[in-house]
Structure formats: C-alpha cells, structure tokens
Image: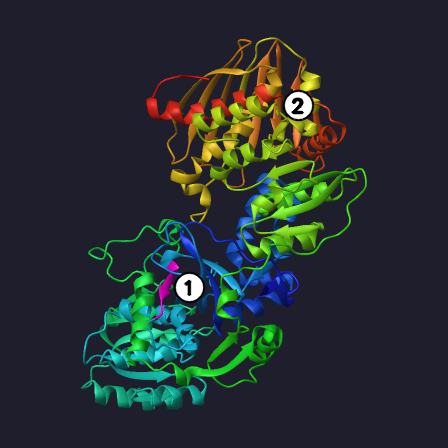
Amino acid sequence: MKQVAQNYKSGELAVLDVPPPGCQPGGVLVRSLYSLISTGTELMKVGEAKLSLVGKAKARPDQVKKVLDTVAQQGLRSTYQKVMNKLDSYTPLGYSLCGVVVEVGAGAEEFSVGQLVAAAGNEFALHAEYNWVPVNLCVPVPDGVQPEQAAFSTVGAIAMQGVRQAEVQLGETTVVIGLGLVGQLCVRLLVAAGVRVFGIDTVDDRCRMAEKAGALACSSPDEAGVASLERSLLEASNGLGADHILLAAGGHSNGPVETAARLARDRARVVDIGKTRLDLPWNAYYDKELDVRFSRSYGPGRYDDRYELQGIDYPAGYVRWTERRNLECFVDLIAREQIDIASLIAGTFPIADATDAYAKLSSGSLPGVGFLFEYPDVPTEELKQVAPHVASQASSTSGAARLGFIGAGNYASSMLLPHLQTNAEATLARVATNKSLSAANAQKKFGFEQISTDANEVLTDETLDAIFVVTRHSSHADLTCRALETGKAVFVEKPLALTYEDVDRIVATVEATGNDRLMVGFNRRFAPLLTDLRTRFGQQGAQSLRYLVNAGKLDPSSWYLDQGKEGSRFAGEGGHFIDTLSWWLDSLPTDVYAVPGPDAGDVIVTIKFANGSVGSINYVAGGNTRFPKETIDITGGGRNGRLDNFASASVWTGRKPSTKKARGTDKGQRAELEAFVSAVKNGTKMPISFDSIIATTRATIAVDRSLASGSPEKV
C-alpha cells in the first residue's frame, strides 16, 4: 500500500510502498477514502524536519534535556546511536480520515465490514491506504454525510473540545484569534451554539470566510484592526467585552495573548487550542482575573492508552464528552446540516502527489485552509481483501545464518540490528512489525530481504535458522513457544515471561519439542569490561554483591507503565541484573526477598544463591538523572571489586586498586549477538544455559510475588 512519510533527519518527504497493517483485536482495519491535511500541525512538523540539527534542538529543547541526561547515564556512543536511529527514520503524517471498514477485529463487533467510518489519531488515522484503528478512535458516519466532509472530524473534535473548555452559553460573546482550519471550525461551532463570534487573523481571506460562516466581524491583528474590532465587540456586548477568547493561532509572537487580555471582559475565560506563545502579561491578566485554560487535543481519553488502545470508556455520568463522543457529535452536526464543511474544502490531491501537495502548501501558494488526500477507488468486493503483507526480496548470503525478526522497535534498531548488519555470519532475512513504517524503516536501514506486518510469516518461513522476538513484554512467552515449535533457535529480549504459568509453558514446549536452543538478551554478562573484571577478581567462593541501578523516572507516555498488561518495571528489566549476579557467581538463585523503596517503582531485592553467596539489587527511580545508571560492588576472599557504569572497573587486592577504563559504554550487545549467531551457524550450545535462563526468569517473577506477600519467595 502507499503511505506518506517523512524522514525527520533529512526532511525528505516520500510516498512509500509498505505492507498494510494487520487487523488486531480491539479495532478495525479501514481502507481510506479521504484523509485531511493539517495545515497547522503537519506543516509545522514538516518545517521542523528541514531544520539543521541545531535548529531541531532549538525547536525541541525538551528533547535536548532528555538526550543530555541519557549521555550522562549511558555514554555518548550509545546515546548517539539511539538519537540517530530515531531521527533517521520515516515517521508517519496524518491524523484525520474517513474510510470503509474492511476487517473487524475481536472486540470491535459494533462495526461491520463495508461501514463508512471517521477515524482519529496520529498513530492510527494516517495518510495511508490502510489503517488499523482502535474502537474508541473510530465512529460510524451517518447516512448522507459525504466522506470528504467526514474526514474533517478529528480536527472538528479538536475545535469542539476548545469550545467546551470555554463553557460557552447562549447569547455570550467569543473572540477567536487565529482563523486557520481549527479557528474556522470554532467559528462554525460557536455560531451553531448561539454565540456571537468575532475573529482575528493576519490573512484577510480567512477573515471574510469566517464572516460568511456567521462571525459578526473579523479583522487583522494590527492596532487599527484590533481597535475596530474592539469597538464592534463592546457594542455587541453592552460594553462588557468578550466572555471567552479562543487562541487558535500558532507562531512565536506574544501578540495573541496580549490581544486576548485587551478584548476580554472581567473574569473571562482564555482557552489555548493552538501552539501559542504564552508569556502572560501579569498585570493585564491579574487585573481582570482571567481564567486561562488549555484544550487538550480531541477531548478526554487522549493520551490514555487504557481508553485509546484497550477500549475502556469513561462513564458518561462522569465524563460526558470523551474524544469519541466529540467525534460522534461532530459528524452528527454535519449530518443535520448544522455546520458547513463544504465551504472549507479548498483542494483535493491524489495520495500519489503528496510530496507536491506539501511543497505547495509550505510555500503558501495555495489559498484556503482545508485540503484533502484522495485515495484510488477500489471495487467493494476488493475492499475486503488486503494485499499480501510482503515487500521486496533479495538474494541471501551464502553460508550465513538466516535471521527473522518479530518486532523492530527502538531498542532492536539501535542496539541489536546495527551489530547484526555488520556480522558476516548473519543474514537479515525477514522482519515483521505491527506498524507498516517500522518494517519499511528496518528494511531501509538494515537491508532485510522481506518485510511484513504479520508475525506468522516469520514463524512459517522455513528458510530461517533463527527467530528473534523483540516485541512488548506481554507477547514474549507466547511468541517464544510458537518459535520453539518451529525447531529453530530463538532469541527473545528480556523478560522471557511475566508469570510462572508462562515459564511452565515454555519448559513444557522445550520438553515436548526437544528444542532447547533458546537465548534471552541478558547482555551484561558479555560486557568486555565486566568479563575482564571477573577474570581479574578470580573465583573467591561465597561472595557478597551489591548492584545499584539508578533507573530514573519513566516518561509518562511509556508503555512500561501499563503494569496490568506488560508487568512491573522490574519484571521488564530486573532479569538483566539477576542474570549478571548469577553469572558472576556461577550459581543459580534459590531465594528472593523484596521490599518497596520510598519512590514509586523502587525495589530493594535480596537474593540467596546456591553456593552460599548473597546479592542485593537496589533498583531506584528517585535519583539524579546525571548519576551513573549501574554500579556493581563485589566483596569476598579479602578482595573488593567495582564496576562503574561499564566505564571503569577496579579490583582491590592490596594497598591500591587496579583500575581499567573503557573508551565507551559497552554493555555487551555485540559480543552477545556474535556468540548467539556463532552457536546458530555452527550448531553449538547456546551461550546461556537453559537452566540459568529459567532460574533467572523465575527469580525475577519472584520479586513481584515477594513484594505482594511481604515474605521471602523460593525460586
């Protein structure tokens, strides 16, 4: 299928041929008829992508801070790889469309094949021929509504949420500052609600368009224009001023905020809808005690994965207008002809001409605010058939181990695939990802022979020698069992499993198939500085070890926070640290005792090992972001050892320590993958024993069980 994408590093815009997404549970697969071009959000993103790296940094200072914190913890090389991987990738554009349902996933049976729907979401309603959309971001389009008008629904919901935040009432007065697409829709919604509307914009044609839609008067933002508008506003409001100001403007000027204070009545509401500069003039806002509010996207539910991805609705008695109900309300207004959308449509482009369309829009050569992409007509019977999920194919490398990947997210793309790409003994044969562009990015960067959005195509590919499972945690156990059943070697990123039941299922699969060629991505034991430290320290019998992990706070949007589905944060990461201690001691864990720390997510773990050694893991989130992430201290046999964040390692055997330093931060991924590929190619044993993998996984699960019970847990 065709999809519009942009490389944020180079600024390149392209219409790519990518595999269509599969239909997942909890949503529907939609074939696009029209998708709306956001002349605000999208053109801003397109413009940022064309900036230099310095320009991008200035545009996103929040991301620069994250990068600097990562450098302090993980080193320059590792951080550079991650940042470049994100920048040098195709990213999708679009978030508002209308299309036809071609497949219904489990749990989305309220929809039917052939149904016309409006869809939202910058991860789901993309400029692409096919999109998978979860149920709470998709609504039926009433009979009689033209699909090109329904494609405006998402931006309509954005405008509607802004109007709702203003809490307008019949007979009140509102000024809309910024009469682009969102502003024009605000004007129409306000007029439909019986509100007297005024508008301000730098473009005269937009002012006249708003007046035709029912605004009483619109003007330019210069002094003469504002003064004229102010006179009309005071006359219409009996000298009070505006009850509400809607800021739908963008840019770096503070003019909209200052004008809002001038035109607002005492205790009016000022609602920010666009990305407006907000240096509030304190005296002006204080004197009138203005109520400044923000309008968050389409409405309640936005950015909540439980609502958007899991389909968990908010009861109407508590949250009357969610983002889905806003979408439904907007298409209903169109159906009842209470809001005019046709006059907003200024142009329609074939999806194949997307790059030319963006060039014209960016240059300002096209008048108007509403532009659409149109998708080729497809006979109804063909709408039910999605094209095969396969892209290009190339010849394999003779003698190399042929590898298939299920998943190719940021970790795989920055820490695994670059090493495999340069390994002469490995051929990257096939990759399957949930998202179409992820597969396309993996092929572009790493040269995969075949790409798809269906994991079954990897699992059933008989030409593969090994399968990598690099997906979200909750899917690891099932995919690992299915991969082991193929008889191939399997590499799965930690954690192997989230429950004892899943561990037992994996053990049963190994026993039933006789295939124990399993590897888990416990890379620390392969780190060169740590392996050298172990050699220099020597085996000293029973030892005491302390592993400090300065994990830091998670980004609020991280899927790691979905503990109900993906397990706790420690369940996802803790296996690394337990495996490292077990490898160092050459002994398996037997007992685990864990207590929570003072900050959310903190865990203090004590582990007993079969050889009498004791290890502790302090996994804490409340530390300074610039403090080293991982520190290991070892004591035993009259010696001490320390690893400082894979940057330096010291052994104390006499009066002075013997210290070695690394040039960069190497946590062992390259050596780990070389060992695995060699074992696959040569048929030798796996780099980590199956018994060790299972014991580490069970010990990791036991940590959460101990936290819940308050007692030690046997492994």
Main SS category, magenta section: strand
Task: Give the spatial CA distance, label 2 vs label 1.
Answer: 55 Å
* In-front residue for pair 627/141: 141
Q: How many marks?
A: 2
Q: Determine the residue positioned at 62% across, 77% down.
A: 356
Identity, as a three-letter code, of the amino acid under mark 2: Ser
* Residue 174, image quadrant: bottom left
Residue 164 spot, x, y in % from top left: 27, 68
Q: Amino acid at mark 1?
A: Ala
Highlighted range, magenta: 137-141
Which label was assigned to residue 120?
Answer: 1
Task: Give the class, few, some or many, for how many residues have Cα within 10 Å of label 1's Cα (few <14, many ≥20).
Answer: many
Pick whichever, 493 or 602, lies toward us.
493
Q: Quadrant of the N terminus?
A: bottom right
* Residue 138 painted magenta: yes
Q: Residue furthest front?
A: 381
Horizontally, residue 27 falls left or right of residue 127, namely left
Q: Which type of secondary structure does the marked residue at label 2 adopt? A: strand
Q: Which image quarter: residue 19? A: bottom right
First in sequence, mark 2 or 1: give its number. 1
Does residue 496 lie above or below 225 as drawn?
above
| Location of residue 670 in the rendering, given as x and y in whole percent from the top left corner | 70, 36
Q: Is 520 rendered above or below residue 210? A: above
Residue 584 in sight here: yes
- The residue that disc 2 covers is 650
**Image height check: is 605 above or below 405?**
above
> Which residue extends farthest right?
398
